[in-house]
Amino acid sequence: MEHYDLIIIGGGPAGMTAGIYAARAGVSVLLLEKAGMGGQVTQTHEIANYPGFTSVDGFTLAQNMFEQMTSLGVKTEFAAVDKVDLKSNPKKITAKGVTYTATSVILSMGASSRGLGVPSEKKFVGKGISYCATCDGNFFRGKDVAVVGGGNTALQDVLYLAPLVKSLTLIHRRDGFRADEVTLRDYRALLNAPDSNITEKLFYTVVDVFGNEKLQGITIRNVNTGDTEDLNVDGIFVAIGRNPQTEILDGAITLDEQGYILAKDDMSTNIEGVYVAGDIVHKSLRQIATAVSDGAVAGTQASVYIKRNR
């Protein structure tokens, strides 16, 4: 059974930053990531609010973080975690049937895209329904699409997709947007341009999707009147929030009512030696900058804990 000073679960900006700080502090680190390093940041076409970069694509930023982290000796394994025992001493983490032990653990599993929750959604995932505009937008070049949501991600999806597609309908359950002022300004400029291909459907929600082998349309409902109508679209991009990835936890970690992990200022949890970082944390703002901040604190504090308990 391999033992490490620190095991980090999740390879997004938070997890990689924690790895960088912990490795520089001289502790042995294993980072477990179930998919690809960078998490959701790799799906971002353009990042314009990360300090030090006027503009950078998500893949490049994540790759730079990964190279910096591994150059410091952090070991990485691409394996989904099946089971955790965070109360044991040492703590036990099982991934792909292999059990590792560690003095300390940092949880940075992030959050996944929230689905529409409509009857036929699963049938058309990958066949017209997408949760990542920059991943799949090119497949809908010259076609009719819809974007669902009213936050930064939704409006950034509109900005990315509008130049590619024939027409774009933005569907939002209210008339106010939660996006930052810069994104909102750019969206409104594109919406009001003389050659705009964007239509707004405000005070609407999606209640179903339909088609044969591929998506052919969606049914939307007016939240004020209850009236429904069908829109013929080739694709729909869903950007209505995210769900924290806490499924692997054994119930020992304290969560808020939405499933996010409660943490102190030093990113510690209710279990000694277990820290948390990134979008899985209960907090008011989830950005790359805040994930990196969490990771720096968690990696540093975990290192202090490890050295104190050697």
Image (tube, rainbow, N blue to C red):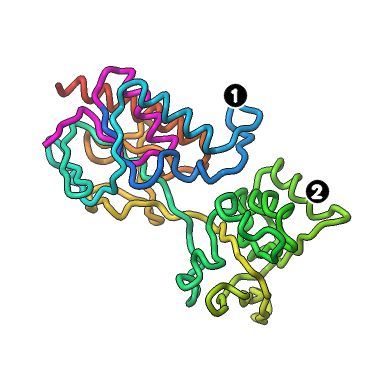
- What is the three-letter code of the residue carrying label 2? Ala
Screen quadrant of the C terminus: top left
- What residue does disc 1 label? 52
- What is the three-letter code of the residue carrying label 1? Gly
Does the magenta run of residues contain 25? Answer: yes
Dot 2 falls on a residue whose secondary structure is helix
Dot 1 falls on a residue whose secondary structure is loop
The crowd level at tag 1 (other Cα within 10 Å; few <14, some 14-19, many 20+) is few
Alpha carbon separation for disc pair 2 and 1: 26 Å
Q: Quadrant of residue 53?
A: top right
From this view, report whether residue 22 is shown above or below residue 142: above
Q: Earlier in the sequence, mark 2 or mark 1?
A: 1
Question: Are dots 2 and 1 in contact, CB under 8 Å?
Answer: no
- What residue does disc 2 label? 189
**Is residue 281 left or right of 141 when viewed as pictured?**
left
Residue displayed at 43% across by 55% down: 243
Name the one closer to the observer, 33 or 103.
33
**Is residue 37 left or right of 95 when viewed as pictured?**
right
Residue displayed at 33% across by 52% down: 246
Give how far across and how far down residue 303 sits, in percent. Answer: 27, 23
Does the magenta run of residues contain 62? Answer: no
From this view, report whether residue 246 is shown above or below residue 202: above
Give how far across and how far down residue 196 sits, in percent. Answer: 82, 57
Q: Tell me the magenta residue range.
A: 1-28
Name the one closer to the observer, 212 or 280.
212
